Amino acid sequence: MWNRSRRVTLATKITIDHVCASAAISLVFQPVRLKVAKGTAYFGDGCLRLQQPLSPVIRLGAERVFGIGVRGETLEHQEEAASNEEPSLAQVMGVLFNVMFLDHLATDVEHLARLNKLLRNGQISQLGIEDCERIRPLATLLIAPTVDLSELARQHQKDMPYLIQYFVNGLGRDAAACSDLMSYLLFTPRYTRALLEIGYHDAETRIDEIEEFLFASSDGTSRPNGDSTAKSRLERRR
């Protein structure tokens, strides 16, 4: 295990409580009580502090990183974001949440790609510096939804409890102005089912690329019998 400034790692068995703690956005959801070495402590979403989301898996020895983002970088969404109107409080909060929870993954992957390129070109040494971890090339694959989740959240706004709808609508001019913020607050069955369907559809669309990445051996060749595993799971699910 490893420790860094304001970061301590502990070996533990991951449970549903750890998942809930990871999703407990501060000021929105209650922190979750978990067991630690000296009793218990309360935990919330780690993205508030973790500025390099790939750091833990890299330090734990990963050889390849498969990242699943939740922001669809579409041109249409970027064009719709342009507006001459002053942003509402809901829009400001949505931007702040995006900065904390969405932007770091893509940036970290880009940084890792630059390090891989420098290593391949021999511009930096894999030996690293004394007392530091050995620098090594890492394969990465990042996928993101093909659907704008903020727009999907806007479509499901009426699924939210009335009091939450009233509160969120009071922060923005209309549903569109609140969509980014709502995408963090919606945990209704219809919305989560829609998210699952999008995930299955996007995975099915890129299944060959995903299989090639996951089942490749360390030398880059495909592993035997790995070609049909992910496909068969998707087919059984369908």
Image (tube, grey):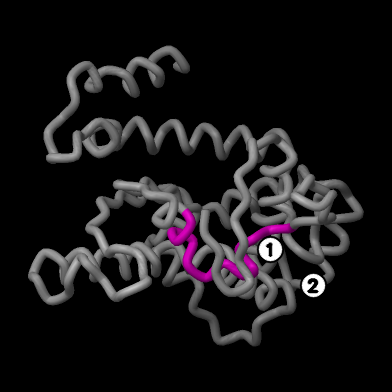
Crowd around label 2: few <14 · some 14–19 · many ≥20 (10 Å)? some
Q: Which residue is mark 1?
A: 181
- Indicate the position of residue 138 as horizontal and vertical percent values: 26, 54
Which residue is at 17% across, 71% downward? 125
User: Which residue is the site of mark 2?
Assistant: 171
How many residues crowd mark 1 within 10 Å: few (<14), some (14–19), many (20+)? Answer: many
Report the quarter where the C terminus lies. Answer: top left
Q: Is 21 situated left or right of 47 in this image?
A: right
Nearest the viewer among 187 and 99 is 99
The location of residue 135, given as percent across then percent down, is 27, 64
Q: How many marks?
A: 2
Disc on the earlier residue, 1 or 2: 2
Q: Residue 207 lies in what quarter of the image?
A: top left
Magenta run includes residue 119: no
Part of the protein shown in magenta: 44-56
Q: Nearer the viewer, mark 1 or mark 2?
A: 1
Amino acid type assigned to the residue bearing label 2 in the image: Leu
Residue drawn at x 50%, y 73% as measured from the top left:
81
Mark 1 touches mark 2? (CB < 8 Å)? yes
- In percent of width and height, residue 35 lies at 79, 45
Residue at screen point 45% across, 31% down? 200
Residue 143 visible, this angle? no
